[in-house]
Image (cartoon, coloured by chain):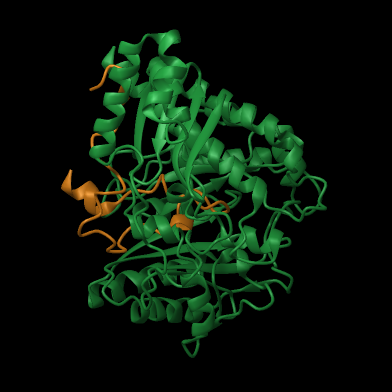
Chain colours: A green, B orange
């Protein structure tokens, strides 16, 4: 794969890349994607640096003056339509709107029945003791969310941990209370549970399905990969137990939820330095019959033996490329596979305000510890300097809210000049803080992986388009 | 559609923001990804309803 970028000052205007024989241009500020022939590729590579006269002089002999004139006319037309070299949308000085919280992550259990080696929660306890969230704290979180949600109608609660199903009774009470209070207040709640699947028995499964609760099920891929990183406390691998729980979930026939189709399930795994060839794990999960898969790089201290290093990037890039081609092959054969990070909507997708601020951690989205302490997101729980308040009294440190509202792509180091800024939104604040000590300084190799995933996602869309136009 | 340049979008994703920014969409980290923020793959519920 070759790639190039064209800049105006420090701002990326156009990103050019080649993948599997396709020459692709992403116009950064309009979000428009173009498929190029060789002539247009060469001209756009030099456009802005050379005058049209010089471009004709440089490429006229190779391609013929007529071809160059034609391609230049197309470039001019697209520029006039705002589809090439579009100007920056001009959001410098922007602050995300304040005052409304729309999502909470409830850490129902700072306790876990697994001992995953890479757990950022330190065995589920987040540096403290085993602790379950009292249902009363969960109900207060529902009240807090409604009170802080302003005009937002759709509200979200994610049950997280540790392992949230260790506190299933509280989960049920929070769901019941949320649905009742939502009806009273004109709010529509959706719930998600992120679980290691070990405790998924028929009662739990049917409760989740019948109440339309989405599930994110943790399985890392091949048995030896999963077992090495996700053992039980005694050291025994959890692959068999996890797979059994997930299969029960997938196979169970339960009563229909109130709004069929509103919930989803994903298999979510983590890859580390121990399985840099992670494409094999995605395909293993697909081979087990799962169609919706998310596999993500581990977030770990740089000194951990399993943490990703910058030197691993070439191998990881090749894995994403291999996976993209495999997804393309399966799509052509009528067996599509949904890989979360290769999804992209080129005809709509998120609005610009959403693209600038991303996940909304610290202002739209917060996490609640079992004792009611509030943090900017689940990854910040227990991190010094990021305690925002407590659900019991509803106090929120507005200085931290303001810090996160300002943490958007025009304020993050390196983001204004990056071609990917409207797709990654500056990346994960928690990763930036962990690696660089500031939420305004994105984590370097993470950026490179995001860019590679975006190129693959755009290529898959381009290939789909090529298929239609054949 | 040009001879040398073929545009694959049917709309300009970053220009079609009139009336959006309502905040009713899913929070990115509440989805299938819990450790790496990606927004380009999120869905705008408003535009979805209008399709």
Give the residue at x 51% y 21%: A325
Compared across the picture, whether A332 is left or right of A249 comes to: left
**Number of marks drawn:** 0
Q: Nearer the viewer, residue A327 or A352?
A: A352
**Residue A176 rendering spot, x and y as whole percentages:** 36, 70
Q: Quadrant of residue A457?
A: top left
| Viewer-nearest residue: A210 or A23 | A23
Front residue of A172/A354: it is A354
Question: Where does the image place residue B4, in percent across and percent down from the top left?
Answer: 32, 18
List the single residue furthest toward the bottom: A393
Q: Is residue A209 above or below residue A357?
A: above
Which quadrant holds residue A429? bottom right
Q: Residue A236 appears at what percent x and percent y?
A: 78, 44
Which percent across, then down, holds residue A50? 45, 31
Q: Can you see residue A7?
A: yes
Q: Looking at the image, which is closer to me, A146 or A362?
A: A362
**In the picture, residue A316 is in which quadrant?**
top right
Vertical placement of A105 versus A115: above or below?
below
For the point 66% across and 45% down, the residue is A445
Q: Left or right: A137 with respect to A444?
A: left
What residue is shown at x 42% (from left), y 58% (from top)?
Answer: A356
Is residue A329 visible in the rendered image? The answer is no
Quadrant for the C terminus of chain A, please: top left
Using residue A207 as the reference point, say whether residue A5 is left or right of it.
right
Using the image, determine if residue A315 lies above or below residue A364.
above
Quadrant location of the N terminus of chain A? top right
């Amino acid at each position: 794969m070759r790639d190039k970028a064209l800049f105006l000052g420090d701002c990326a205007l156009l990103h050019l890349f080649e993948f599997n024989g396709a020459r692709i241009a992403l116009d950064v500020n309009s979000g428009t994607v173009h498929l190029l022939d060789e002539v247009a590729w060469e001209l756009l590579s030099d456009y802005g640096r050379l005058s049209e006269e010089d471009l004709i002089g440089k490429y006229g002999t190779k391609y013929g003056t007529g071809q160059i004139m034609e391609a230049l006319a197309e470039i001019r037309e697209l520029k006039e339509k705002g589809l090439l070299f579009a100007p920056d949308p001009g959001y410098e000085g922007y602050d995300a709107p304040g005052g409304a919280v729309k999502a909470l992550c409830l850490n129902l259990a700072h306790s876990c029945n697994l001992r995953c080696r890479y757990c950022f929660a330190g065995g589920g306890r987040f540096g403290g003791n085993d602790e379950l969230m009292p249902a009363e704290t969960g109900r207060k979180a529902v009240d807090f969310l409604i009170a802080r949600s302003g005009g937002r109608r759709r509200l979200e609660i994610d049950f997280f941990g540790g392992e949230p199903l260790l506190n299933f009774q509280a989960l049920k009470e929070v769901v019941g209370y949320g649905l009742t209070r939502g009806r009273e207040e004109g709010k529509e709640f959706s719930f998600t549970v992120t679980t290691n699947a070990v405790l998924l028995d028929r009662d739990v499964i049917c409760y989740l399905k019948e109440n339309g609760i989405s599930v994110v099920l943790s399985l890392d891929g091949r048995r030896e990969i999963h077992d090495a990183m996700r053992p039980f406390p005694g050291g025994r691998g959890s692959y068999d137990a996890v797979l059994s729980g997930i299969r029960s979930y997938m196979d169970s026939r339960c009563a229909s939820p109130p709004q069929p189709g509103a919930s989803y399930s994903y298999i979510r795994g983590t890859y580390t330095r121990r399985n840099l060839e992670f494409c094999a794990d995605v395909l293993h999960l697909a081979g087990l019959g799962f169609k919706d898969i998310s596999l993500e790089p581990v977030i770990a201290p740089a000194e951990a033996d399993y943490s990703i290093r910058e030197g691993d990037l070439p191998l990881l890039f090749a894995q994403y490329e291999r996976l993209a081609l495999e997804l393309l092959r399966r799509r052509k054969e009528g067996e599509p596979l949904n890989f979360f990070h290769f999804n992209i909507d080129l005809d709509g997708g998120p609005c610009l305000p959403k693209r600038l601020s991303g996940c909304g951690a610290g202002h739209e989205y917060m996490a609640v510890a079992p004792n009611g302490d509030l943090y900017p997101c689940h990854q910040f729980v227990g991190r010094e300097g990021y305690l925002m308040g407590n659900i019991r009294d509803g106090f929120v440190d507005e200085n931290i809210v303001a810090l996160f509202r300002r943490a958007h792509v025009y304020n993050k180091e390196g983001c204004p000049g990056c071609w990917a800024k409207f797709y990654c939104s500056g990346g994960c604040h928690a990763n930036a803080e962990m690696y660089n000590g500031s939420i305004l300084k994105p984590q370097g190799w993470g950026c490179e992986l995001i860019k590679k995933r975006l190129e693959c996602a755009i290529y898959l869309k381009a290939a789909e388009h090529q298929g239609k136009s054949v | 559609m040009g001879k040398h340049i073929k545009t694959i979008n049917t709309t300009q994703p970053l220009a079609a923001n009139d009336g959006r920014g309502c905040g009713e969409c899913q929070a990115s980290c509440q989805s299938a990804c819990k450790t790496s923020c990606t927004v380009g793959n999120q869905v705008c519920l408003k535009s979805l309803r209008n399709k």
